[in-house]
Image (spheres, rainbow, N blue to C red):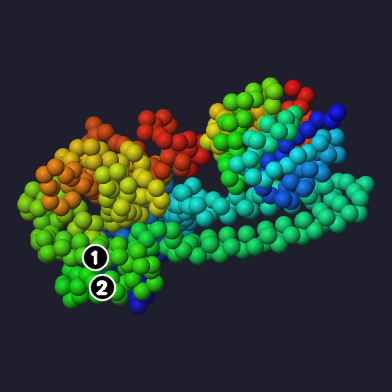
């Protein structure tokens, strides 16, 4: 059975592009755009990897990550965070919340795929 | 030397035309009798020939050099440089002025980006849309075997996102254009009011001479601002009129030449409160021929409720001020006269003199906590540079754009790694 990823992102065209790219890489891709049900989706889907946007409706990516880390360690559930804010303060918050890798928008497809591969091979 | 031929002037000053030419082009310096003769021939004060434009130019060159100590400019030969190469010297001074202005703009815009929710949202939208386009366009460009259905879908997505990007960009450009003079499309009533006050200047002659009352002046000035900003302006102008009644411009003028812009000395001499003197100096300094002053007022929570920046001392347009400001020291020690030398952490070469004072606002009632206000006046000390033993406090505009390190007052990391 292939690996699964949950993409938590609210921008439809980014979802479509990432879904296409990861499916081509052999991933089964689940998506949600609503921050408030994201943790519940993780519990239900039990993905091998989470790709998480920071600014989401319902709940911020940082809060989702903090909640996830109470149940899932970074070894069990790697989280790749995507954000348009790449300043050191944002990285610090993400690191403290337990992020596995942090990527600043805009990123290249190859960069994103490389990050997903690296996290899934851990 | 318009109106007089060079040969005529040379003759009157008893020198050759070629020697006068050298003087005119700053290749020879003049003094003594020759200076007096030329000044008499031109019917001007001798000082006008030796000071004025050239002195200002030399001062600017020195200031420019002091900001870049590592460059080791030949400071002792500044006069000679300005004299021999006036064009290049002008260019250098002009470049220095331009850089200073641009650095101020960077500080203002960075401050705006940090604290302006509209701008932060626009930037987020823009980056998100760019990411979608970048990602989708890469798929289209790099996937030769893309099925027609996906190709159409991604092409449509790129088209949609391009339109959205154009819209976001347009709105952002319009927003920045509107606010390029930092006065329009403002966020809060206080900013709206500050923008009007900045445009008309700190002194209200109608209130000074009593030809208009605060309410009708508010009606006149508040034509294009929000109701909340108008209300704030009304309060501010009523306070201004009360201040005029307590300390008239003429009364202040009578002591200013002797005491200088020192609110504590003036307060002691005239027997009025230091905060009143500070407010009056903030309104009237330039009218007394003094350099522009900066003035800030904060409430008991430290929130800046009045900001009057000067060319040499910028106060943040958004958020709180630098915690190193004497304003906040005053807030913790009401009724004490706080003075300090402050050095703006931008590109200023000489420290400024800051005076700060805090006191309760209005009457104090039993069993009710007083409402404190802290006031700070920052003045250009002119020739008074203090002594080498004075402690100089380096102050920034806001932590995020402040290069000072280390700083025990820092609230968040700076985005500047090595200063401006």
Name above or below for residue B303 compared with residue B94.
above
The image quadrant where one finds the N terminus of chain B is bottom left
Q: Are marks 1 and 2 in contact (CB under 8 Å)?
A: yes
- Residue placed under numbered mark 2 in the picture: B217
Instruction: Report x, y in % for residue B287.
Output: 22, 64
Q: On the image, numbered disc 1 is attached to which residue? A: B237
- Name the residue at 46% across, 49% down: B115
The image shows residue B419 at horizontal and vertical percentages of 47, 39
Residue B55 lies, in percent from the top left, at 33, 55
Seen from the viewer's position, the closer of residues A14 and B1 is A14
Image height check: is A112 above or below B36? above
- Between discs 1 and 2, the one toward the N terminus: 2
Quadrant in the picture for residue A101: top right
As drawn, is A49 to the left or to the right of B96?
right
Q: Report crowding for label 2: few under 14, some 14 to 19, many 20 or more residues within 10 A (C-alpha).
A: some
Disc 2: host chain: B
> Callout 1: 10 Å neighbours few (<14), some, many (20+)?
some
**Residue at the spot 56% in from the left edge and 64% down from the top edge:** B174
Disc 1 and disc 2: Cα gap in Å?
8 Å
The residue that appears at 73% across and 30% down in the rendered structure is: A46
- Judging from the image, mark 1 belongs to the subunit labelled B
Q: Nearer the viewer, residue B66 or A89?
A: A89
Question: Helix, strand, or loop for circle 2?
Answer: helix
Question: Could you say where residue B214 lies in the image, as x and y percent from the top left?
Answer: 22, 70
What numbered label is drawn on residue B382? none
Residue beneath the point at 32% across and 72% down: B221
Q: Nearer the viewer, residue B130 or B149?
A: B149
Q: Nearer the viewer, residue B231 or B338?
A: B231
Q: Is B397 placed left or right of A56 in the picture?
A: left
Viewer can see residue B297: yes
Can residue A86 be seen here? no
């Amino acid at each position: 059975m292939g690996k699964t990823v949950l993409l938590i992102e609210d921008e439809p065209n980014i979802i479509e592009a990432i879904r296409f790219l990861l499916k081509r890489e052999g991933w089964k891709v689940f998506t949600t755009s609503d921050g408030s049900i994201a943790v519940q989706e993780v519990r239900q889907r039990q993905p091998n990897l989470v790709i998480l946007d920071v600014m989401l409706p319902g709940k911020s990516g940082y809060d989702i990550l903090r909640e996830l880390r109470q149940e899932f360690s970074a070894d069990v559930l790697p989280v790749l965070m995507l954000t348009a804010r790449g300043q050191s303060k944002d990285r610090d918050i993400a690191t403290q919340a337990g992020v596995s890798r942090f990527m600043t928008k805009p990123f290249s497809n190859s960069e994103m795929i490389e990050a997903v591969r690296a996290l899934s091979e851990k | 030397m318009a109106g007089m031929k060079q040969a005529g002037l040379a003759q009157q000053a008893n020198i050759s035309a070629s020697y006068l030419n050298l003087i005119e082009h700053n290749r020879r310096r003049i003094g003594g009798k020759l200076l007096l003769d030329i000044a008499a021939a031109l019917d001007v004060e001798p000082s006008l020939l030796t000071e004025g434009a050239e002195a200002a130019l030399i001062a600017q060159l020195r200031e420019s050099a002091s900001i870049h100590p590592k460059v080791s400019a030949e400071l002792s030969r500044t006069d000679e440089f300005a004299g021999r190469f006036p064009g290049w010297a002008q260019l250098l001074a002009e470049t220095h002025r331009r850089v200073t202005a641009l650095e101020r703009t960077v500080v203002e815009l960075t401050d705006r980006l940090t604290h302006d929710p509209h701008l932060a949202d626009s930037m987020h939208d823009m980056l998100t849309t760019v990411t979608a386009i970048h990602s989708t366009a890469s798929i289209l460009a790099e996937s030769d075997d893309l099925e027609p259905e996906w190709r159409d879908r991604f092409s449509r997505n790129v088209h949609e996102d391009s339109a959205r990007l154009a819209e976001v960009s347009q709105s952002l450009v319009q927003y920045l254009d509107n606010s390029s003079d930092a006065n329009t499309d403002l966020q809060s009533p206080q900013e709206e009011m500050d923008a009007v006050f900045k445009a008309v200047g700190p002194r209200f002659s109608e209130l000074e001479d009593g030809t208009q009352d605060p309410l009708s002046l508010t009606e006149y000035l508040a034509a294009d601002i929000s109701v909340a900003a108008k209300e704030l302006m009304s309060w501010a102008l009523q306070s201004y009129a009360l201040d005029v009644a307590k300390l008239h411009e003429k009364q202040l003028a009578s002591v200013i030449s002797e005491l200088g812009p020192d609110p504590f000395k003036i307060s002691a001499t005239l027997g009025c409160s230091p905060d009143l003197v500070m407010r009056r100096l903030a309104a009237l300094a330039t009218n007394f021929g003094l350099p522009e002053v900066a003035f800030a007022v904060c409430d008991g929570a430290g929130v800046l409720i009045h900001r009057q920046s000067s060319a040499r001392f910028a106060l943040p347009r958004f958020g709180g001020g630098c915690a190193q400001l004497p304003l906040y020291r005053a807030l913790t020690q009401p009724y004490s006269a706080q003075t300090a030398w402050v050095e703006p952490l931008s590109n200023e070469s000489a420290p400024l003199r800051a005076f700060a004072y805090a006191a309760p606002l209005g009457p104090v009632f039993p069993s009710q906590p007083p409402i404190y206000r802290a006031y700070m006046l920052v003045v250009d000390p002119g020739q008074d540079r203090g002594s080498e033993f004075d402690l100089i406090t380096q102050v920034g505009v806001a932590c995020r754009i402040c290069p000072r390190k280390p700083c025990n007052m820092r609230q968040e990391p700076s985005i500047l790694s090595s200063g401006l």
